[in-house]
Amino acid sequence: MAGEKQSTRERMKGKSPKFTIPKEELMDVGHVGCQGCGGCHTMRYILKALGKNTILSIPACCWAVMPTVLPFSNMKVPMLYTAFEVTGASISGIRAALDVRGRTDVNVVGFAGDGGTVDIGIQSLSGCVERGHNVFYIMYDNEAYMNTGIQRSGSTPRGAWTTTTQVGSTEDWKREPKKNIVEIMVAHRIPYACTASVAYPEDLVKKLRKGLEINGPKFYHVLAPCPTGWRYPPEKTIEYAKMATDACAFPIYEVEYGKYTINKKPAKKVAMKDYLMAQGRFRHLPDKEIAAIQSEIDYNWDLLLKKEEWTKDIKTPQ
Amino acid sequence: MAKEKKETRGRGDWKTYADMPPGPISMKSTRGVSLTGGWRTVKPVIHLDECIKCMTCWKFCPDVSIVVRKDGYPRVDYVYCKGCGICANECPKECIEMVLEDTPVTEEPEGEAVAEGKEA
Amino acid sequence: MARKVMTGNSATAYGALVSGVEVVSAYPITPQTTVVEKIAEFVSDGSFKGKYICVESEHSALASCISASQTGVRTFTATSSQGLLLMHEMVHWAANTRSPVGLVNVNRAVGPPWSIWADHTDAIAQRDTGALNIFVESAQEILDMVIQGYKVCEDPDVLLPFIINADAFFLSHTFEPVDVPDAKKVQEWLGKYEAPYPLDPDDPHGYGSLTFPHQWYMELRYNIKRAMDRSAELIPKVSKEFAKLFGRDHGGNVEEYRTKDAEVALVAMGTMVSTARDVVDKMRDEGHKVGLVKVRSFRPFPQKELRDIAERIPVLGVADRCYTYGQEGPLSTEARAAVYTLKDRPVIKNYVIGVGGRDIHVNVLRKVFLDIEKVKEKGLDKESVWVGLKRPPDEPPEVM
């Protein structure tokens, strides 16, 4: 092409925008999530993937207050609030009721935080998955009981400060590693379980669309960084979600009836030290602890790579 | 599931116990009521000269506060934008600037309409 | 209509079946187990056309029933003692979401120590939840009240969960002839359950959001009060309608037996009422002017009916099959409160009897009646006594 280079403005004239995820918004403005809240991203993306024909069951969690108060709501799908521990039971009941009346086309989604899933909600989740109901379970993981003020949960990673694992002179940060809920789901012989992240909405949408083709329980562990609880400036939510995957602290993978596929292999691995020090909740960690955490993360990543290798050619039962 | 006779209790404005639905049911939208734009201390300004209409800002806005104009460019909905700054942080062309809330900003008028972008 | 010999638990299962229940979600616990087993039998032979969820706990049982009810279907569950207590959070939740879930509770003592026998503690512990609490004395009555429960509670001005209480073993495992009404006729009378705002993607709403002190919590609770008051009006009405259609009238909120010219009466709930009837008949033959008041509806409490009875009968003995520590038997407390506003209050004596399933023998009840007569003659000695307790030899027996 001869002549001087076209300006961006001229190039874009008349061009249509590119959408890599569905356009329809089923979540409206006016919700009171914190600035930069990863939980907001999660809800927005899952509704885009699943569409209008969806019923949500939400226990006590940040999303229980984000649509604001009676009589208002920002949601364009039915949203049933339940008690804290019952998401698995609730979606089982909704599914049964819909099926009895012939509405097998409606998507039933349990949308819960990490505490309400891996701790208090684990019994009802286990029961639901064991019974094999055709439901979606989305766990948006901000890695603590954020709604009640940043208390530790089973999903809080090792090393984190929380209000119930305060650092102080006794160095009482959380010592235990993060509960691996996807592995727990795999042990239930779930047809589909995966991790996903708000940093990769296309991947999440693709996985949810895959779930629409599966008749059975589907579990999605979505990393949803929380600026308030992780102690970082709100504009970094997506950046740090990416960093979590690049550091292998939160690998993105899926398990289809026991067959492992890692969806994102970091081109350039980020050191755990960089990931941890970016967040205020880890800034107290001494080098020794960071090294121990790095070794744990390396082990988990290695194990995951091996699982992908071992199950590469597995034939799932008919 | 649609009934011939639709329940009406609670559909109007609630003023007393007699106006309410039987259970704690929300029927009104937050739009127009919960004006979260008041939370901001900084706000995004999209400089359209460098914008490539990639919709990354629209995609990553947690508050559904970036909408698509008829000419295909993104627009910030300042009534609801909380000023989190994710759009500015993620823009691949770095053409979104976070400015102080009281900075006067004039939005560029919409250009010619383009074909609606196809969705994935 | 079929007439079969069956246990109370079977009758419970038949009640749910003919009522056209659409989702059953339950967990086994002695002595309710044969309820869930019978329903499973109905699933296996194809007679139950709904969905049966074998949940992993009672809490999940009622939670899934509530969510199913909010989706807009008729739901049912059954449990006992520990299970009902585990569900307790959800009993509140069912009332507060205005879900007309049907629950049959086989009254069983609460542990420790483990006891599987009849006791009303489990049911009474639900009295503040906003659920209806009905006590029955026969397998037939369980079946009929499951049906009537749906009729009352699915009324658009009620929409509350109901608990039908049936004493462990005396009802759950004892056989009696039961008429099973025709399912089609029952379901025609009940109609299909239509929730006011079912979960429906075509009409989306939020259910259960946060609300502040200044609005609307108090109003929502007041509406539950109105709903419960409405149910008190409906229970006797529905009973009469049922009698017209199916030929059996178990009574309204209370049922009086030979109280017309009674000088004293025993107020009681559950299976001890059946025993008391025999005792009343025998004592009447001997010339005692005794009567019996069966409280069927503990919630809503029959305040009007009791005031009416108290105006006619000056001395009442109130029997409780459990106890509220620090107060007295709960039925007695409620009875005293109901009659408090009367100008001439009756004398009320509380008899705590049959706790933990201890047998309530005809001789024991006879002694209770004689004691009530003594109260009429000599005045009230003690407000609340425990009957049939194994006492130290130096302690005088209360009644026995």
Image: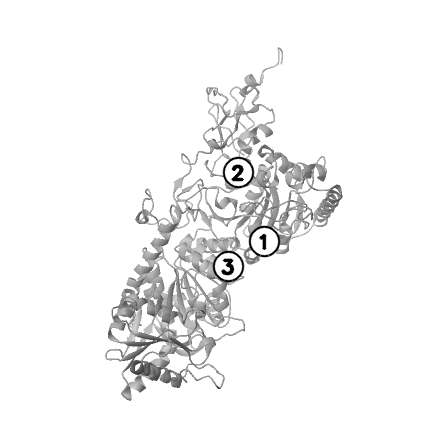
Asked if one can make out residue A264 in the rendered structure from this viewpoint, the answer is no
Q: Which residue is mark 2?
A: A34
Q: Residues within 10 Å of mark 2 (few under 14, many from 20)?
A: many
> Which of the image's four quarters has the C terminus of chain A?
bottom right
How far apart are the two marked residues, 2 and 1, measured between alpha carbons? 24 Å
Image coords of residue A210 (percent x, y): 57, 44
Circles 3, 2 touching at the beta carbon (< 8 Å):
no
Image coords of residue A43 (percent x, y): 52, 41
Q: Are marks 3 and 2 on the same chain?
A: no
How far apart are the two marked residues, 3 and 1, measured between alpha carbons? 15 Å
- Type of residue at label 2? Cys
Q: Which residue is mark 3?
A: C60
Image coords of residue A81 (percent x, y): 46, 49
How far apart are the two marked residues, 3 and 2, measured between alpha carbons? 32 Å
- Relative to A242, residue C27 above or below: below
Give the mark nearer the N terminus: 2 vs 1.
2
Tag 3's secondary structure?
A: helix
Residue projecting furthest to the top = A3
Q: Which residue is mark 1?
A: A119
- Type of residue at label 1? Asp
- Relative to C53, residue C212 above or below: above
Is B70 situated left or right of A169 in this image? left
Q: Residues within 10 Å of mark 3 (few under 14, many from 20)?
A: many
Image coords of residue A141 (percent x, y): 59, 45
- Relative to B1, residue C65 above or below: below
Q: Kindly identify the residue that appears in the image at 57 percent across and 50 percent down.
A: A115
Write down the chain letter for disc 1: A
Camera-side residue: C32 or C296? C296
Write down the chain letter for disc 3: C
